[in-house]
Image (cartoon, rainbow, N blue to C red):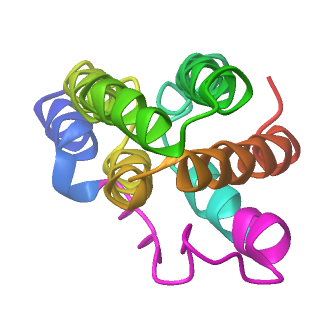
Amino acid sequence: MAHHNQQRNSYNNRNNRPPLPTLNTSNIKLDSIATELFNSIAQETAATIADNPSRMINKPTQLRRFYDEIVMWENKASLLTANEEDEQKRKEKFAEMLPFIKMINAKTAYAQGRKLVDKNYVTLINHCLNQVNDIKTMKHFKLFMEAFMGFYKVERPS
C-alpha cells in the first residue's frame, strides 16, 4: 500500500506533468498586419494554448470572457472615431482609456493565479497589449483575438 501511495504522490507532483509547449509570439505584430496574422498565426497560437494537458485550464468560456472585454474596449475606441471629428481629441480620449485596457494584463494574471488560464495565455495577452497604443492597434488586437477564438473553438471544443 505504501508503494501505491508513493506512486500517486509522484504522479501528482508538478514536475511530472508534461511541460507546456512554448508559445511563439514573435509573428504577432499588431502595427502592420501580416498576411497570415488572422489565419495560420492565429491558428498556431490557438493550437499551442489548447495544448495544455489540464482540461481545467484555458476553458473556452474563460477565454471568451477576456475576448468579450477586448471587444467591449475596441467598440468604445471605435466610437471615438465615429463621434470625434478632431484627430487630437480622439488620441487624447483613447489615451484616457488605455490604462483600463492594459488592466486586462492584471486580470489575466489573477486568472492564472486561480489556475483558470496558463502562462501561455497570459504571455499572449501581455504581448498583444504591449503593442496596443492607438485605435488602429486596438482594432488589430480585437481582430487577432477573434481569429484566435475561432480556431480555439476547433482546437478545444466545449
Quadrant in the picture for the N terminus: top left
Is residue 49 found left or right of 11 in the rendered image?
Answer: right
Provide the major secondary structure of the magenta segment: loop
Q: Is residue 25 magenta?
A: yes
Q: Residue 157: horizontal and vertical position, in percent? A: 83, 32
- The front one of 137 and 51 is 137
Occupied quadrant, residue 77: top right
Quadrant in the picture for the C terminus: top right
Q: Residue 139: horizontal and vertical position, in percent? A: 66, 46
Instruction: Using the image, determine if residue 109 lies above or below residue 134.
Output: above
Q: Residue 27: horizontal and vertical position, in percent? A: 56, 82
Residue, x 40% and y 55% (percent of image)?
120
Residue, x 42% and y 47% (percent of image)?
125
Q: How many marks?
A: 0
Instruction: Using the image, determine if residue 18 lies above or below residue 44.
Output: above
Is residue 16 found left or right of 116 in the rendered image?
Answer: left
Q: Which residues are magenta?
A: 17-43
Q: Looking at the image, which residue sits at the far front? A: 86
Q: Is residue 86 magenta?
A: no
- The front one of 56 and 83 is 83
- The front one of 46 and 73 is 73
Instruction: Using the image, determine if residue 28 lies above or below residue 4.
Output: below
Q: Residue 64: horizontal and vertical position, in percent? A: 65, 22
Residue, x 54% and y 23% (percent of image)?
73
Residue, x 39% and y 23% (percent of image)?
116
Residue 101 visible to an observer of this rendering: no
Residue 96 visible to an observer of this rendering: yes
Instruction: Using the image, determine if residue 146 lies above or below residue 67.
Output: below
Occupied quadrant, residue 114: top left
